[in-house]
Image: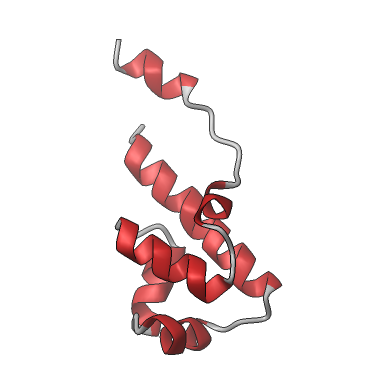
Amino acid sequence: MDISKDLQKHIGNKLTEIRIKNKQTQHDIEFITGIDSGEVSKYEQGKRNLTIKTLAKFALALNVHPKDLFGFEFDIQKYKAENE
Protein backbone atom coordinates (compact mmCIF):
# COMPACT_ATOMS: atom_id res chain seq x y z
CA MET A 1 0.00 0.00 0.00
CA ASP A 2 1.20 3.47 -0.85
CA ILE A 3 0.02 6.11 1.62
CA SER A 4 0.80 8.96 -0.78
CA LYS A 5 -1.26 7.49 -3.62
CA ASP A 6 -4.13 6.67 -1.28
CA LEU A 7 -4.15 10.21 0.13
CA GLN A 8 -4.11 11.64 -3.39
CA LYS A 9 -7.17 9.57 -4.26
CA HIS A 10 -9.04 10.61 -1.11
CA ILE A 11 -8.26 14.29 -1.67
CA GLY A 12 -9.23 13.97 -5.33
CA ASN A 13 -12.56 12.44 -4.34
CA LYS A 14 -13.11 15.31 -1.91
CA LEU A 15 -12.34 17.89 -4.62
CA THR A 16 -14.92 16.26 -6.88
CA GLU A 17 -17.50 15.98 -4.11
CA ILE A 18 -17.23 19.65 -3.16
CA ARG A 19 -17.16 20.83 -6.79
CA ILE A 20 -20.33 18.89 -7.61
CA LYS A 21 -22.02 20.07 -4.40
CA ASN A 22 -21.20 23.64 -5.47
CA LYS A 23 -22.65 22.93 -8.94
CA GLN A 24 -19.32 23.83 -10.52
CA THR A 25 -17.79 22.23 -13.58
CA GLN A 26 -14.14 21.44 -14.14
CA HIS A 27 -14.17 24.34 -16.62
CA ASP A 28 -15.39 26.64 -13.82
CA ILE A 29 -12.41 25.55 -11.73
CA GLU A 30 -10.11 26.11 -14.71
CA PHE A 31 -11.44 29.65 -15.14
CA ILE A 32 -10.93 30.51 -11.46
CA THR A 33 -7.58 28.79 -10.88
CA GLY A 34 -5.90 28.90 -14.28
CA ILE A 35 -5.38 25.13 -14.02
CA ASP A 36 -6.35 23.42 -17.28
CA SER A 37 -9.56 21.38 -16.92
CA GLY A 38 -7.67 18.25 -18.02
CA GLU A 39 -5.30 18.77 -15.11
CA VAL A 40 -8.25 19.42 -12.78
CA SER A 41 -9.54 16.01 -13.84
CA LYS A 42 -6.19 14.39 -13.02
CA TYR A 43 -6.18 15.97 -9.56
CA GLU A 44 -9.73 14.76 -8.96
CA GLN A 45 -8.78 11.23 -10.01
CA GLY A 46 -5.81 11.24 -7.66
CA LYS A 47 -3.35 10.99 -10.54
CA ARG A 48 -1.57 14.26 -9.73
CA ASN A 49 0.10 15.25 -6.49
CA LEU A 50 -1.20 18.53 -5.03
CA THR A 51 1.30 21.14 -3.95
CA ILE A 52 0.36 23.57 -1.18
CA LYS A 53 -0.01 26.28 -3.84
CA THR A 54 -2.41 24.14 -5.89
CA LEU A 55 -4.32 23.09 -2.78
CA ALA A 56 -4.82 26.77 -1.94
CA LYS A 57 -6.07 27.49 -5.47
CA PHE A 58 -8.62 24.68 -5.21
CA ALA A 59 -9.77 25.84 -1.78
CA LEU A 60 -10.32 29.38 -3.09
CA ALA A 61 -12.10 28.16 -6.23
CA LEU A 62 -14.34 25.85 -4.21
CA ASN A 63 -14.92 28.52 -1.55
CA VAL A 64 -13.85 26.24 1.31
CA HIS A 65 -11.18 26.29 4.00
CA PRO A 66 -8.16 24.18 2.95
CA LYS A 67 -8.77 21.83 5.90
CA ASP A 68 -12.14 20.94 4.34
CA LEU A 69 -10.27 19.20 1.53
CA PHE A 70 -9.03 16.71 4.12
CA GLY A 71 -12.49 15.92 5.52
CA PHE A 72 -12.48 12.18 4.98
CA GLU A 73 -11.86 9.01 6.99
CA PHE A 74 -8.33 7.65 6.68
CA ASP A 75 -6.94 4.65 8.56
CA ILE A 76 -3.32 5.65 9.20
CA GLN A 77 -2.77 2.55 11.34
CA LYS A 78 -2.64 0.20 8.38
CA TYR A 79 0.33 2.12 7.00
CA LYS A 80 2.20 2.20 10.31
CA ALA A 81 2.33 -1.61 10.42
CA GLU A 82 4.04 -1.68 7.02
CA ASN A 83 6.80 0.66 8.16
CA GLU A 84 7.74 -1.24 11.33
Confirm whether residue 49 shows in the render: no
> On screen, 31 above or below 83?
below
Which quadrant holds residue 23? bottom right
| Residue occupying the point 34% across, 80% down | 35
Where is residue 55 shown, x and y percent of the image?
Answer: 40, 61
> On screen, 69 above or below 84?
below
Where is residue 73 shown, x and y percent of the image?
Answer: 60, 37
**Left or right of 9, for residue 1:** left
Confirm whether residue 43 shows in the render: yes
Where is residue 46 shown, x and y percent of the image?
Answer: 40, 57
**Left or right of 43, for residue 21:** right
All told, the count of numbered labels is: 0
Where is residue 53 shown, x and y percent of the image?
Answer: 31, 63
Query: Which quarter of the figure is the N terminus placed in?
Result: top left
| Residue occupying the point 30% across, 9% down | 84
Please tell me which residue lies in front, 60 or 79: 60
